Image (spheres, rainbow, N blue to C red):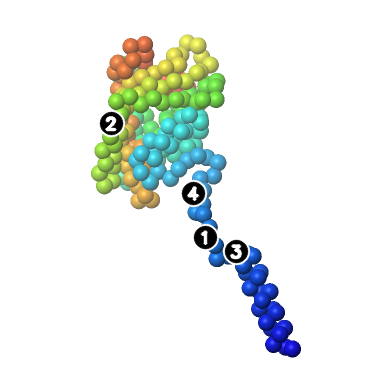
Amino acid sequence: MQSKIYILILFILLLSIESCDIFSTRNPESPDIGNSGLLPATEPSMLIQNFENSLKSSNIENYMNCFYNFKDNTNNEFSFTPATDAYTQFPTIFNLWNFEDERRSITSIFSSINNENGIIVHWKNRKPIQETADSAIFTSDYIINLTNENQNIPNNFAGRLQFTMVNRDNGLWYISKWIDVNINVSDSIKYSWSMLKAYLYN
């Protein structure tokens, strides 16, 4: 009688294990990036994607996370070299431009945008990213489109940028240097990205 009880208990246990389906294969979960939309920039191309997405979503923190801001005795702290059209008109704004100037500028720019599309970047003549062990260079002509509340400021800017991106010991990439150049990308657009920064820097 006792052996029958043991068999019955064993049978019930087997049924419950099968119904739980604990041995079945689970589908892999997507990486948890929260609600920010910021992907770990483990490749330079992912850093460029984060940069684009942060502009489109007008997300200040995601935008600033693209730039190098670590006090670690390297020479990688973020710097910006403006295009000549902007530097000629606004030399004092761009002297010793740093991470906090970038934050101040993008905060003002995002607050001036009056649509849901943020800033749209169109890359033109985009060059392949040139990588070394700990740095990478991204160069491309660009056209950026936005709609801002100040009718005295254009909604389109164009030029050429070069990012120097560095790989930190955490395995992530950051923009260390940004060089902006005003060139004739579009006959109808005469101002560079630097001019947008200068117009809305306050």
Q: In the rendered structure, which amino acid carries the disc numbered 3?
A: Asp
Q: Name the residue beneath numbered marker 2.
A: 127
Q: In the rendered structure, which amino acid carries the disc numbered 2?
A: Lys
What residue is rendered at 48% in x and 29% in y?
Answer: 56
Q: Name the residue beneath numbered marker 3.
A: 21
Q: Name the residue beneath numbered marker 4.
A: 31
- Of 125 and 3, which appears nearest the observer? 3
User: Element at badge 2?
Assistant: loop
What residue is rendered at 69% in x and 83% in y?
Answer: 6
- Distance Cα–Cα, label 3 vs label 4: 24 Å
Q: Name the residue beneath numbered marker 1.
A: 25
Which of labels 4 and 1 is toward the front? 1
In the image: residue 101, left or right of residue 133: right
In the image: residue 149, left or right of residue 154: right
Q: Residues within 10 Å of mark 4 (few under 14, many from 20)?
A: few
Which of labels 2 and 3 is toward the front? 3
